[in-house]
Amino acid sequence: MRKTSLILSILVAAVASAQPSSHNADDISQRALDVLGGGPAWEKARYISFTFNVERDGKIVSSFPQRLDRSTGQYHVSGKSEDGVPFDVVVSIPTKKGHGTLAGKAVTEGETWDRLYTLAYRRFINDMNWLLMPLQMLDPRAHRTYDGERSDSCGHTWDVIKLNWDASAGLTPGDVYWMWINRDTGVVEEWDTKTVAEEKPIELIFRDYRRIGGLLLSTRREIKGKNQVLRFDNLKVLPEVPKGAFD
């Protein structure tokens, strides 16, 4: 997930969450947003922290503890780069200034800082939006269309909303997304993603919804057919930043 404006801005106020009577993409999306707490609860959600764990075949293959102050854009993340180099960085996303360590060495400027900032920024774009992906459906750069309904043999029905993005949005604006919204509950239960490089969409099943800080968030996403799980462990959503959170 690649969009940034949702994370550092406040969504429009929520309207009534009654089940929509038509197949209007905006009405269905707004109802889902209301169910998730994307209005007043999101306005109060200043501090977000969690550990993003990628689990494959039952084993954690990557782990990134992180925290964000939505009011200032202050962000802290640690982990390992794709080539296995450990890093730890505190950075202001809007100003690109900060400090950290790469392979255990202190970094504040120069080419090494540029590399460290890029590592942090990509984690910010990827992980925060994996967590908050359903809440970005009414981003002003998103274009929503109704893509029909799906149903199963058990009588469940989903309204599917297709999302495309403006060319200026995020790192990969050409990606396409499909939200499966349960018609009875208004909850997003599946989110399919197709990148430009992929022939078929990746199907993510949303599991373990929890109400945290007033927001209803899925804390575990199963990637269908990949034996892979995305986990958001130790998730906190608070109205204030804990003392020392970015020291």
Image (cartoon, grey):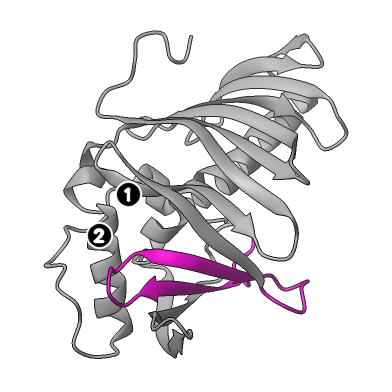
Q: Callout 1: helix, strand or loop?
A: strand
The percent coordinates of residue 224 (x first, y second) are 67, 65
Which mark, residue 216? 1
Residue 234 versus residue 55 in the image, above or below: above
Numbered range of the magenta stretch: 172-201
Task: Give the amino acid at mark 1.
Answer: Leu
Which mark, residue 196? none
Q: Are marks 2 and 1 in contact (CB under 8 Å)?
A: yes
Q: Nearer the viewer, residue 120 or 22?
A: 22
Asked if residue 167 lies in the magenta stretch, the reply is no
Q: Is residue 227 shown left or right of residue 43?
A: right
For marks 2 and 1 on the same chain, the one whose residue lies earlier in the sequence: 2
The quadrant holding residue 154 is: bottom left
The quadrant holding residue 99 is: top right
Which residue position is annotated with label 2? 35
Task: Give the amino acid at mark 2.
Answer: Val
Observer able to see residue 34: yes
Q: Callout 2: helix, strand or loop?
A: helix
Q: Nearer the viewer, residue 169 or 157?
A: 157
The quadrant holding residue 148 is: bottom left
Observer able to see residue 108: no
